[in-house]
Amino acid sequence: MLLYLLALILFIVLAQAESSISTVVQSKTASPEIAVAPSLTPTFRDPHAPNPQKCPGYKATNIKRDLKGVKADLTIAGPNCQAFGNDIRDLVLEVKYQTKERLNVKIFPKYLSEQNKTQYILPESLVFEPGRDEKTTISNSDLRFDFTNSPSFQFKITRSCNREVLFSTYGHVIVFEDQFIELVTNMEPDYNVYGLAENIHDFHLGQNFTQTFWTNDAGIEHGNPIDGNIYGVHPFYQQSRYHKGSNTTSHGVYARNAHGQEWLLRSKTLTYRTIGGSVDIYFLSGQNKQGGSTAIETMRQYHAGCVGLPAMQMFWTLGFHQCRLGYDTLDKIEAVVENYRAADIPLEAIWSDFDMFDGFRSFANNLVTFPPDRMSKWVDWLHENEQYYVPLVWANIYRPNPDDPKDTYGPYERGAKLKAFIRDPESGDFYTGNNWPGFVVWGDFMLPETHKWWAEELKIWYDSVPYDGMLSDLTEPASYCVGPCGNSRLDMNPVHVPFLIPGEKLRMFYEYPDGFSVTNRSEAEMAKELAANQSAEVQAAHVFQVPATSTLGRTEPTPGVRNLTYPPYVLNK
């Protein structure tokens, strides 16, 4: 009887929650057409895609060797290939013995100008660039660089102590085009490679795996995609070789590149592909002071020497923190903290999601549900108890409707005055995409003015509502449409995102943890039934259904043209 009453109460509460919303979506919604794009076949899945290994490769000339490394010119060894871009005829090879355990190989265009330099050369201001220690030479390096010019330029990296081959392009050509680069290294049978994060995959990557590097908002509507590209990019792998007995060796390979990439692990080879930048690869010996090489030492060399150690954190950041979507009023989030205290559960910090925003706009509190004056007093109360507060900040910035004088937003207006946002290369206007607030722009952090603007917005918000940290979100960056869809639609702002928001009708949460017991009309069974009914209703309502896409297998390279929207090499999703 008690179980029946609990189920009945749950049903009434959920029914009231749904009936309180009169429509599925109450605000304007942009046409689903803004999310329509040609259906492109990922290149590695396309059996008819060009084979880059049929390209002519390069020949090395003007070779200069010294104790610190090698420098040479690389010239294309035959007719242009144009597999997935325009071939770069003349390249430069630079090899440097940087430290005892690290060797760097760079290959980049010989002729660079202010117009094309940023396409190929990654500034150190964006990604740390390891340097030489000025004392390492070929004679005391753990590693050795060798190459051949027959039939084309190919190179290999070996251990100095025993000539164990760690990386070898022998038998394969190097391909270097304006929108495509390929290196292929030979791998021994049953090799063991780890890393190439971020992904949801087995720790051991295996020999039939493709890792795509293109940061993706794998968020609320996408779940956690197995083997898909998600939030982070770490183009580094560590390889361990388990020899007979207890002898194990390890080494690492790091590709310093911020463009889209794919790493194709196959039974006999590992292929590195990127749609921009240059070859800037760091080989790590993994060798320690005892003469062996280990996975732990390889990781130390990668973090300490290549990308830098994590920033030192304040002690409180290492404690227990609480964060979730759904604390939609200050009263609720206050109650969470008080309940932790009542239950005598230690809580170092409380975080808030976008529930606190006014119209999903960063730096703007909802004045009714999260009034700044109350928020400020509440944060002071947290601090008195040695607790801390961390709010969310999105990378996207709402762009107001120019036809609505009441639609104002200080962070955008101040940023626009400083010209702080990314621009559409075709129109010259700010590049306007779509995200939670509606049509949005993004800060161009290549510009000094953008750093000043961002710091000022953080300060203005802090002066209103003090905080102790920041959850920086949607920095991929994420957009829910194709291209600069908002530039011609600003008169529609604010528009609803192209999916249902949690809490709206047809978007209620009924999920229970895995493994719950379904008994006779239990709460769990009731929730399961409601979830199924909701799913059926969503399908029947045809909410946010995107029209069918046109089919386009791939684009062809156009001489002298860099296709940024649909590159000839199609990355996997």
Image: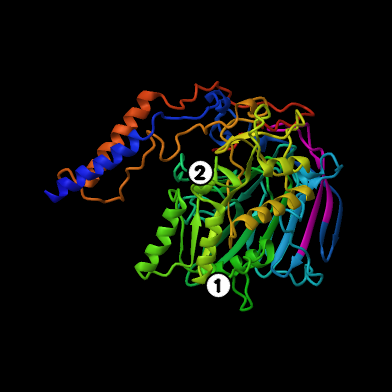
- Closer to the chain start, of discs 1 and 2, is 2
Residue at the disc numbered 1: 315
Disc 2 residue type (three-letter): Ala
Give the side of residue 372 with respect to residue 26, left or right.
Answer: right
Is any part of residue 148 visible from this angle? Answer: no
Q: Nearer the viewer, residue 542 or 71?
A: 542
Q: Is residue 314 above or below residue 36?
A: below
Q: Position of residue 460 (x, y in %)?
A: 67, 53
Q: Nearer the viewer, residue 173 or 493?
A: 493
Q: Position of residue 246 (x, y in %)?
A: 48, 72
Disc 1 residue type (three-letter): Phe
Residue at the disc numbered 2: 218
**Quick one: label 1, few (<14), some, or many (20+) residues within 10 Å?**
few
Q: Which residues are magenta?
A: 71-97
Give the side of residue 539 with respect to residue 268, left or right.
Answer: left
Name the element at disc 2.
loop
Q: Nearer the viewer, residue 165 or 282?
A: 282
> What is the quadrant of residue 38 in the picture?
top right
Q: Position of residue 428 (x, y in %)?
A: 77, 31
Q: Report the number of discs.
A: 2
> What is the quadrant of residue 89 in the picture?
top right
Q: Is residue 365 above or below residue 336?
A: above
